[in-house]
């Protein structure tokens, strides 16, 4: 005989802290990035990331994140910060006149990833509070009857003088200081010549600096209203004049909005309401075509923009001269949601979009990560794109599939490179491969030689040499202009084609078959 139902409940053993804490985020740079994003969400205009005592054996290594944001009240600490599942983004998508960058409260878990001890000093409405946590109090407990809410932490009111004494910083009218100590990862390495002669692992800080440089997309976020500073006490680079060789100082936004050299690029955007796709392809500074079509293929997508640039050997050299790093070392196609980068997309050796895998199937037919650089911009006010808690990408839901890989009609188990990203990439690819014939340079004009002349000597674009001359490029482009655009005539709303391309069209009937209104640009394609 069945008995009556009774209510049962989940238990949260203390070990859950590790699962959602230090074991959740696998990258130190991402952990620091999440804390900086928290400062942005709090309305801060300035945030400083400071490392201390990294070479001192007798002192605790420390990391401080200091911001002038709105701070937290006692209520905020108790019912928001200490509520493991709380995230302001679940409640409201924007605050402090900013779309929220953080998600799922990952910032608190980043603290656990980075160090064993945590002190938070925060001021809001004239009151200053200090929260103190020793993460090791939650670890190595084998008694499964011990719940996470049975482990005490410390909270107290404090004073500005105490904050200054313990952190070295003035807390001001409002703001938050996160002090993480007893760092879990060694940010220094031992010199092989002496066990006790420690030297800073500069490359680790170069990597962190690079992560912070590419955190914000300027075309989506007014980054001038939010400044990031990096400070490593043991690094003395005050007399270093080259920004690229500096560690200390203000972090410049190195993710380009527009590079100041001419290249071949495509920009395609799905409108705010998701109804239309607007695409423009430019070769150097000349518009080749612009189209407006109904968005039938990607009903889940709206307010999405893709910008992809092809870098020929000259473009790669110009990129290095402007950005201070080779394009291959910069990365490839980055993904931004609400103006903030989502790792690992775009990072070196990451092929989340399958660009390199596809390139391997046709070296001379497809563009690879070394050939293009760009970004995907998404404004997501409805949380369609779900960021994975470990910060290792976004969930491959229907929105993501329509962005990158859609299922084929024959089998839902198979995917095809036919998402919005690939639709855009293929248009650029056809133009570069079939129209420009890869924008190839003559034999003897190696990338190394081009890089040397552009980066070491006076140079202008008139000195560029290509295998195909201007006339041949125009012929190739004009013969294939409609395949390049990849259009379905039933969905076209408007179409503009470069005037010179039109003049080179051999089969005039093609123009009439489209039954479209065609506008012409007066600018010729440059060689």
Image (cartoon, helix red, strand yellow):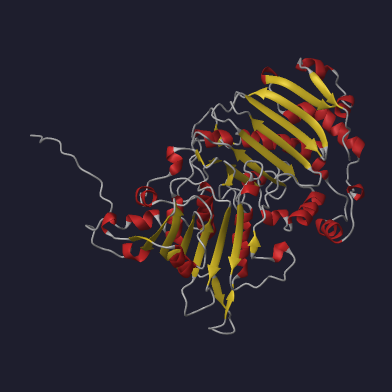
Can you give x and y, in whole percent of width and height, for residue 104 in the image? 43, 46
How many marks are shown on the rendered structure?
0
Using residue 516 as the reference point, say whether residue 84 is left or right of it: left
Asked whether residue 184 is in view, the answer is: no
Q: Depth check: 485 or 362 in front?
A: 485
Quadrant hosting residue 402: top right
- In what quadrant of the picture does the C terminus appear? top right
Residue drawn at x 47%, y 80% as measured from the top left: 58
- In what quadrant of the picture does the N terminus appear? top left
Asked whether residue 1 is in view, the answer is: yes
Residue furthest to the front: 126
Using residue 248 as the reference point, say whether residue 98 is left or right of it: left
Q: Depth check: 319 or 77 in front?
A: 77
Whether 386 is drawn above or below 138: the answer is above
Can you give x and y, in whole percent of width and height, for residue 367 in the image? 71, 44
Can you give x and y, in whole percent of width and height, for residue 291 in the image? 73, 26
Residue drawn at x 89%, y 33% as measured from the top left: 524
Whether 114 is drawn above or below 43: the answer is below
Residue drawn at x 82%, y 57% as measured from the top left: 451
Residue drawn at x 83%, y 17% as measured from the top left: 509
Q: Depth check: 518 or 324 in front?
A: 324
Using residue 55 as the reference point, say whether residue 365 is left or right of it: right
Can you give x and y, in whole percent of width and height, for residue 113 in the image? 45, 60
Q: Depth check: 179 or 292 in front?
A: 179
Whether 30 is drawn above or below 277: the answer is below
């Amino acid at each position: 005989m069945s008995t009556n139902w009774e209510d049962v409940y989940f238990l949260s053993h203390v070990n859950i802290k590790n699962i959602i804490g230090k074991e959740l985020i696998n990258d130190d740079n991402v952990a620091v990035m999440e804390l900086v994003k928290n400062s942005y969400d709090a309305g801060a205009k300035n945030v400083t990331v400071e490392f201390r005592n990294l070479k001192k054996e007798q002192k605790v290594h420390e990391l401080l994140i200091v911001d002038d944001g709105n701070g937290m009240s006692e209520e905020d600490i108790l019912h928001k910060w200490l509520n493991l599942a709380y995230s302001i983004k679940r409640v409201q998508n924007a605050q402090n006149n900013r779309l929220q960058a953080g998600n799922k409260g990952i910032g608190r878990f980043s603290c656990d990833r980075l160090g064993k001890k945590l002190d938070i000093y925060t001021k809001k409405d004239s009151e200053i509070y200090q929260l103190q946590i020793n993460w090791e109090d939650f670890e190595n407990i084998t008694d499964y009857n011990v719940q996470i809410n049975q482990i005490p932490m410390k909270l107290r009111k404090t004073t500005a003088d105490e904050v200054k004494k313990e952190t070295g910083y003035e807390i001001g009218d409002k703001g938050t200081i996160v002090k993480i100590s007893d760092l879990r990862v060694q940010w220094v390495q031992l010199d092989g010549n002496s066990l006790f002669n420690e030297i800073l692992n500069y490359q680790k800080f170069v990597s962190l600096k690079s992560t912070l440089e590419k955190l914000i997309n300027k075309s989506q976020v007014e980054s001038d209203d939010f400044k990031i500073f990096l400070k490593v006490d043991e690094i003395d680079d005050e007399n270093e004049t080259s920004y690229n060789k500096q560690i200390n100082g203000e972090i410049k936004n190195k993710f380009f909005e527009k590079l100041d050299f001419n290249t071949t690029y495509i920009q395609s955007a799905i409108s705010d309401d998701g109804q239309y796709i607007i695409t423009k392809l430019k070769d150097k500074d000349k518009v080749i075509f612009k189209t407006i079509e109904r968005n039938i293929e990607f009903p889940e997508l709206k307010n999405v923009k893709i910008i992809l640039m092809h870098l020929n050997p000259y473009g790669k050299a110009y990129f290095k001269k402007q950005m201070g790093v080779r394009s291959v070392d910069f990365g490839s196609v980055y993904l931004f949601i609400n103006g903030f980068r989502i790792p690992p997309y775009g990072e070196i050796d990451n092929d989340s979009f399958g660009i390199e895998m596809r390139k391997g199937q046709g070296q001379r037919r497809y563009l690879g990560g070394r050939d293009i650089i760009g970004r995907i911009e998404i404004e997501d006010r409805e949380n369609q794109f779900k960021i994975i808690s470990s910060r290792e990408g976004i969930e491959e839901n229907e929105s993501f599939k329509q962005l990158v890989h859609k299922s084929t009609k024959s089998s839902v188990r198979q995917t095809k490179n036919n998402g919005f990203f690939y639709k855009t990439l293929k248009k650029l690819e056809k133009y570069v491969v079939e129209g420009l014939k890869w924008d190839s340079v003559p034999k003897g004009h190696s990338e190394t030689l081009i890089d040397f002349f552009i980066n070491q000597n006076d140079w202008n674009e008139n000195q560029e040499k290509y295998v195909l001359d201007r006339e041949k490029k125009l012929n190739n482009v004009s013969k294939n202009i409609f395949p390049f655009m990849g259009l379905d005539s039933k969905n076209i709303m408007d179409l503009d084609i470069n005037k010179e391309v039109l003049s080179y069209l051999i089969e005039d009937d093609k123009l009439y078959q489209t039954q479209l209104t065609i506008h012409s640009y007066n600018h010729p394609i440059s060689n």
